[in-house]
């Protein structure tokens, strides 16, 4: 009995990456001013940021209903295989609850193992890659799901916001705070904490970002047995410079990168970059 892996598009794997990893994708929806797009199908990440720049209100994502999950899971179960589904944090979306309802509706649902990633974007994608590694090593679906649930609390994700425009649009900071922060070159720091995306600090000047990262890694050491995932929103060159400095300083060899999508991009906008890794603690 083979193991099939499926995740939602908030993991920020591209269609090409998913195909290369033999991972199935569930495409979420993004709403721009009452126009609904299917993430990764009729709106690319490039188009997302282009539309965001023109939007008067922030886009938002919408959760899938149980029947939509049934439609995604049932064909995989019909093949007779086991299925591991790694989904966006239940604290960020009601989608996981919809998937739990779907599991009870499915024929062969006992072979479906749902994993609440307690993460999103590259943190969720990191767990998907771990699932792929275990699948390829011959682990069962139950073993993979249990291992991911043990690992998810050790996923560390930090990112540095390059513009305050969208935090202001979303009401997360005031117009005066945004104006002052822009003038002083303030970079907010966001992290995934207990399954939620939260602001955890602010830096003045991009030169302090590397130092912050290394201090963070000293507090939460990187488990180099696992892959590190870097991410960015429309600032690949900046991210690559950051990646090179971080990997050299921390002795990281196994790393990949992806572009951040709607989950972080909605509030961070372009110019955001950071990393996700599994910590030793």
Image (tube, rainbow, N blue to C red):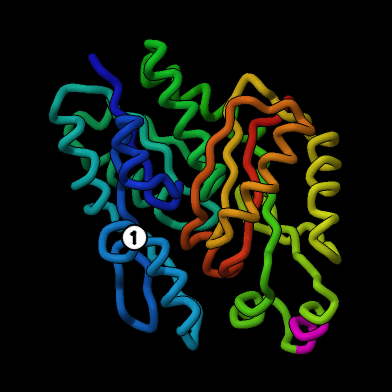
Prevailing SS of the magenta stretch = helix
Residue 194 shows in this picture = no
Q: Is residue 225 left or right of residue 134?
A: right
Vertical relation: 230 (above or below) 162: above
Image quarter hosting the N terminus: top left
Magenta highlight on residue 178: yes
Q: Position of residue 270 (x, y in %)?
A: 57, 67
Residue 179 shows in this picture = yes
Image quarter hosting the C terminus: top right
Q: Is residue 119 left or right of residue 60?
A: right
Determine crowd level at label 1: few under 14, some 14-19, many 20+ residues with C-alpha closer than 10 A. many
Q: Is residue 149 left or right of residue 47?
A: right
Question: Which of the 4 image quarters holds residue 167?
Answer: bottom right
Q: Position of residue 160 (x, y in %)?
A: 70, 58
Q: Position of residue 27 (x, y in %)?
A: 31, 54
Q: Kindly identify which residue carries mark 1.
A: 39
Question: Which of the 4 image quarters holds residue 100?
Answer: top left
Q: Is residue 245 left or right of residue 21?
A: right
Q: Which stretch did the figure color magenta?
A: 176-180
Q: Residue at x 29, y 63 (%)?
A: 38
Q: Residue at x 80, y 70 (%)?
A: 186
């Amino acid at each position: 009995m083979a193991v099939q892996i499926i995740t939602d598009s908030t993991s920020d794997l591209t269609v090409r990456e998913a195909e290369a990893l033999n991972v199935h994708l569930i495409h979420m929806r993004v709403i721009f001013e009452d126009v609904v797009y299917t993430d990764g199908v009729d709106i690319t990440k490039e188009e997302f940021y282009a539309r965001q720049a023109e939007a008067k209100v922030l886009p938002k994502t919408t959760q899938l209903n149980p029947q939509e999950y049934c439609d995604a899971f049932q064909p995989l179960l019909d093949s007779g295989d086991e299925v591991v589904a790694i989904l966006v944090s239940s604290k960020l979306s009601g989608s996981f609850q919809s998937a739990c309802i779907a599991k009870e509706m499915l024929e062969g649902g006992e072979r479906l193992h749902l994993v609440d990633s307690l993460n999103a974007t590259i943190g969720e994608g990191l767990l998907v890659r771990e699932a792929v590694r275990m699948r390829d090593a011959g682990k069962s679906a139950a073993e993979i799901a249990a291992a991911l649930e043990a690992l998810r609390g050790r996923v560390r994700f930090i990112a540095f916001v390059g513009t305050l425009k969208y935090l202001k649009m979303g009401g997360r900071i005031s117009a005066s705070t945004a104006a002052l922060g822009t003038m002083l070159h303030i970079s907010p720091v966001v992290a995934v904490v207990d399954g939620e995306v939260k602001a955890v600090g602010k830096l003045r000047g991009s030169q302090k970002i590397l130092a912050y990262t290394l201090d963070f890694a000293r507090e939460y050491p990187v488990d180099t047995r696992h892959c590190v995932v870097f991410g960015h929103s429309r600032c690949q060159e900046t991210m690559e410079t950051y990646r090179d400095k971080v990997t050299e300083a921390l002795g990281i060899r196994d790393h990949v990168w992806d572009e951040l999508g709607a989950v972080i991009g909605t509030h961070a906008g372009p110019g955001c970059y950071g990393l996700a890794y599994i910590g030793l603690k």
